[in-house]
Image (cartoon, rainbow, N blue to C red):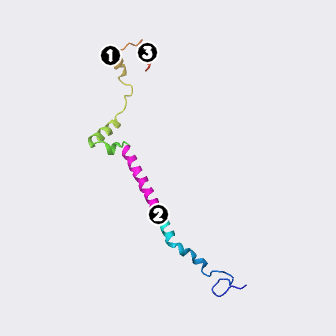
Amino acid sequence: EDPVGNGHEEKESNPFAEYMWMENEEDFNRQVEEELQEQEFLDRCFQEMLEEEDQDWFIPARDLPQGMAQLQQQLHGLSVGDGHGSDDILSKSNLNPDAKEFVPGVKY
């Protein structure tokens, strides 16, 4: 059983069998186009979701007025005292040093 000159065996019932997929080419193209549109729609929805999420987040540089951003930078530059002068504060205090420690939610 030698192949004929066109590369097909003589017993093959339809010499155009390898081209039969072209019969449904329009359906195939429509299906692929629908899948691409669906993917594009999902991408758009995902992007919109991310944008909405970004709007819900508080980003000081974006959400505060310029003066507030400057104040925030100044606040970041502040530091808590290093202990110098705390004796002076204690000497002027009128708190009771023998009082029980305050615990939120506990009634005495």
| Mark with earlier residue (2, 1) | 2
Within 10 Å of disc 2 (Cα), the crowding (few <14, some 14-19, many 20+) is: few
Image-based side of 8 in relation to 54, left or right: right
Identify the residue at image location x=56%, y=74%.
21
Marks 3 and 2 sit apart, C-alpha to C-alpha, by 68 Å
Q: Amino acid at mark 3?
A: Lys
If the image is split into quadrants, where does the C terminus sit?
top left
Q: Which residue is mark 3?
A: 107
Secondary structure at badge 2 equals helix
Q: Compute the Cα span from label 2 to label 1.
A: 79 Å
Between 28 and 91, the residue placed more toward the observer is: 28
| Pair 3/1: label in front | 3
Q: Position of residue 80 (x, y in %)?
A: 37, 30
Amino acid on which disc 2 is placed: Glu
Q: Residue at x 64, y 88 (%)?
A: 5
Read off the residue under disc 2.
Answer: 34
**How far is mark 3 from mark 1, CA to CA?**
28 Å
In magenta stretch: residue 94: no
Mark number, residue 92: 1
How many C-alpha atoms fall within 10 Å of the one at disc 1: few (<14), some, or many (≥20)?
few
Type of residue at label 1? Lys
x and y percent of residue 10 in the render? Answer: 68, 84
- Tell me where the magenta segment starts and ends, as one range: 32-56
Residue 8 in percent (x, y) is at 65, 83
- Dot 3 or dot 1: first in sequence order is 1
Question: Is 10 in front, or is 65?
Answer: 10
Assess disc 3: are there few (<14), some (14-19) or many (≥20) residues with their C-alpha within 10 Å of its C-alpha.
few
Looking at the picture, how far across and down is residue 76, in whole percent? 35, 37
Quadrant position of the N terminus in the picture: bottom right
